[in-house]
């Protein structure tokens, strides 16, 4: 969702998404929803960042991070710590892929939640 429009011919503007990922423990039924924002500029010095491009890049980084973090998890892994590890990884990988991007702890108030998937340990 566009939060701040880009002035014509300038670098700037801002778009945001709110990501929800359910993480569950199969043997106990324990479950949490890992929530975080992904915010990207609309136009960088490298060019425009469309919503579809930002979504694809963020989804790729989230998929890579979840496979790495959840793939190494055990039935005893604390679900909240898995969520925090995911967010910490994304705070590095998303901005490395889109200059100026951020992964805030809380979703922007104007963004709508998007269910990204569910992972069961």
Image (cartoon, rainbow, N blue to C red):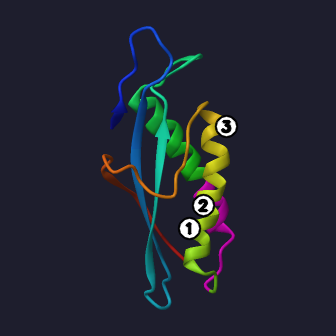
Task: Work out which residue is located at the far top of the displayed protein and give it.
Answer: 9
Q: Tell me which corner region of the image, top left, top right, bottom left or bottom right, holds residue 74.
A: bottom right
Residue at image location 55% in from the left, 75% down from the top: 80
Q: Tell me which corner region of the image, top left, top right, bottom left or bottom right, holds residue 78.
A: bottom right
Give x and y (percent) for residue 94. Answer: 60, 42
Residue at image location 65% in from the left, 74% down from the top: 73
Mark 1 surroundings: few (<14), some (14-19) or many (≥20) residues within 10 A: many
Q: Are marks 3 and 2 in contact (CB under 8 Å)?
A: no
Mark 2 surroundings: few (<14), some (14-19) or many (≥20) residues within 10 A: many
- Most frequent secondary structure within the magenta stretch: helix
Q: Which residue is mark 1?
A: 83
Q: Are marks 1 and 3 in contact (CB under 8 Å)?
A: no
Mark 3 surroundings: few (<14), some (14-19) or many (≥20) residues within 10 A: few
Residue at image location 48% in from the left, 84% down from the top: 26
Residue 96 bears which disc, if any?
Answer: 3
Q: Quadrant of the N terminus?
A: top left
Q: CA distance from mark 3 to mark 2?
A: 15 Å
Q: Which residue is mark 2?
A: 86
Q: Which residues are magenta?
A: 65-75
Q: Is residue 75 left or right of residue 11?
A: right
Q: Is residue 95 above or below residue 78?
A: above
Give x and y (percent) for residue 30. Answer: 45, 85
Give x and y (percent) for residue 81. Answer: 61, 74
> Sequence-wise, which precedes: disc 3 or disc 2?
2
Q: Is residue 17 above or below residue 3?
A: below
| SS state under label 1 | helix
| SS state under label 3 | helix
Residue 31 bears which disc, if any?
Answer: none
Residue at image location 50% in from the left, 45% down from the top: 59
> Sequence-wise, which precedes: disc 1 or disc 3?
1
Q: Is residue 108 left or right of residue 76?
A: left
Task: Work out which residue is located at the far bottom of the displayed protein and give it.
Answer: 28
């Amino acid at each position: 969702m566009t939060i701040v429009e880009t002035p014509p011919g300038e670098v700037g503007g801002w778009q945001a998404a709110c990501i929800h990922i359910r993480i569950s423990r199969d043997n106990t039924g324990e479950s949490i929803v890992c929530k975080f924002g992904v915010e990207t500029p609309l136009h960088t010095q490298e060019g425009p960042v469309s919503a579809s491009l930002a979504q694809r890049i963020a989804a790729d980084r989230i998929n890579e991070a979840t496979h790495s973090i959840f793939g190494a998890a055990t039935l005893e892994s604390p679900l909240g710590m898995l969520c925090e590890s995911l967010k910490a990884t994304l705070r590095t990988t998303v901005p490395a892929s889109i200059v100026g991007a951020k992964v805030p702890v809380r979703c922007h108030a104007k963004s709508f939640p998007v269910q990204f998937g569910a992972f069961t340990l």
